[in-house]
Image (spheres, rainbow, N blue to C red):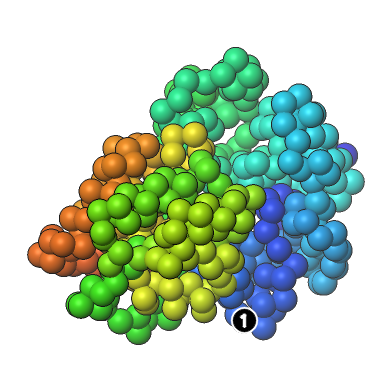
């Protein structure tokens, strides 16, 4: 059984689906992982462990199984089997993976478990405090969809999670105020202390990005994210089709990201004869994203109400590149940068198209939004607002 009274700090970190071994190798060389635009959470975690002289067991669900032990760090890629299942099989999979994490925490004698959302159902972890392991959930998405009523299954899971958020964990890390509100609702306003954080970026990533081309020819709209229907990419295709019918081929869509619908989207764009100004680039690493941001005039985030969002880092990245963002209140990040955003009603495809036309044609309005970006950038460079600082505060508080 884990020994919570041990003098050494032993942290099990369930890090989600990221390539934490790859990030670790960059971290050892004093570098950020170039696969991400922001400073990775696992990179911040390694910094904390070094600062606190803590031993750590990091488990990721990254698709490629791998194991590494190096000094104070034990790092494992433990893929989730049958990851793309749904229905009862999905929930059984979540429970089984959670049991595996509990077993690892006890065998390794962890005294703290930091667990990212999506790893398992939270109520599964409620047993750990009784076995001497303090639990800190790290929430990067809301608990449920913001504008769609909960299903019967979602209501049941929320009721099962109530005890965990009220008494079963030591503190909670939350990526936005939207998440904090749902946790408090789930816990009956009796949740454990909540520590909010923001994504962290390096100035060097955005330094030197030139102002958008004043000629606006073509006017480039950048989408970055998963290529799935719930992320609004097919709504963008509808907008491109609308612009084609109106003779507006001066507005170009650059689509960055991968997903199950990527090839379907490419084929649909070709069939609609908009592929000359609706270009799907696939995955883009940090240097490529810098290039794409440099070319873009605006960033669009048309996520639909069907998606569970927690913050949406793409919004911050658009603002840091001084590119106005078009999005809706589905995206929690909106409230942090509202002056730099053109807000559209959720799922309003025509409204998104109208917003693009206004930014393209109204130069004064566009420049006002660009200037507003400059006023809200500093919060994303501030390490005191980062996940790492929040976690460090939690560890010092509970231990």
Picture quarter containing residue 181?
A: top left
Q: In the figure, 194 relative to 369: above or below?
A: above
* Left or right: 196, with 135 as reference point: left
* Left or right: 118, with 342 as reference point: right
Residue 205 in percent (x, y) is at 44, 77
State the quadrant of the N terminus.
top right
Q: In the figure, 355 relative to 304: above or below?
A: below
Nearer to me, 86 or 65: 86
Name the residue: 76% across, 43% down: 83
Picture quarter containing residue 127?
A: top right
Q: Is residue 4 visible?
A: no
Q: Is residue 15 visible?
A: yes
Nearer to me, 24 or 251: 251
Q: Which residue is mark 1?
A: 30
Name the residue: 65% across, 41% down: 118
Residue 247 in percent (x, y) is at 26, 59
Residue 81 in percent (x, y) is at 83, 44
Name the residue: 59% across, 66% down: 283
């Amino acid at each position: 059984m884990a020994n919570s009274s041990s003098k050494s700090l032993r942290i099990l970190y369930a890090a989600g689906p990221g390539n934490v071994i790859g990030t670790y190798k960059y971290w050892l060389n004093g570098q950020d992982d170039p696969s991400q635009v922001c400073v990775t959470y696992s990179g911040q975690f390694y910094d904390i462990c070094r600062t606190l002289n803590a031993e750590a067991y990091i488990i990721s669900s990254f698709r490629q199984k791998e194991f590494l032990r190096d000094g104070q760090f034990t790092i494992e890629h433990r893929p989730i089997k049958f990851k793309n299942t749904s229905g009862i099989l999905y929930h059984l999979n979540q429970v089984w993976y959670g049991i595996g994490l509990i077993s690892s925490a006890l065998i390794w004698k962890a005294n703290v478990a930091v667990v990212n959302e999506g790893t398992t159902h939270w109520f599964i972890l409620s047993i750990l405090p009784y076995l001497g392991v303090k639990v800190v959930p790290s929430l990067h998405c809301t608990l449920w969809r913001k504008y769609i009523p909960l299903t019967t299954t979602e209501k049941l899971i929320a009721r099962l999670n109530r005890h965990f958020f009220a008494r079963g964990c030591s503190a909670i890390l939350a990526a936005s105020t939207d998440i904090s509100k749902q946790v408090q609702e789930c816990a009956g306003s009796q949740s454990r202390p909540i520590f909010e954080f923001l994504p962290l970026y390096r100035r060097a990533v955005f330094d030197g990005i030139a102002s958008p081309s004043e000629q606006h020819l073509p006017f480039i709209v950048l989408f970055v994210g998963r290529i799935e229907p719930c992320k609004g990419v097919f709504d963008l295709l509808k907008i491109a089709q609308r612009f084609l019918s109106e003779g507006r081929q001066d507005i170009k869509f650059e689509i960055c990201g991968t997903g199950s619908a990527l090839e379907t989207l490419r084929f649909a764009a070709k069939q609609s004869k908009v592929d000359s100004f609706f270009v799907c680039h696939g995955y883009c690493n940090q240097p490529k994203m810098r290039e794409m941001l440099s070319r873009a005039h605006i960033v669009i985030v048309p996520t639909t109400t069907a998606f569970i969002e927690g913050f949406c880092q793409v919004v911050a990245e658009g603002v840091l590149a001084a590119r106005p963002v078009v999005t809706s209140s589905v995206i929690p990040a909106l409230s942090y940068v509202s002056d730099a955003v053109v807000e559209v009603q959720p799922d309003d495809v025509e409204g998104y198209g109208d917003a693009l036309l206004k930014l393209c044609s109204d130069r004064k309005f566009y420049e006002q939004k660009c200037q507003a970006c400059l006023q809200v950038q500093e919060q994303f460079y501030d390490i005191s607002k980062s996940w790492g600082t929040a976690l460090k505060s939690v560890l010092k508080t509970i231990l």
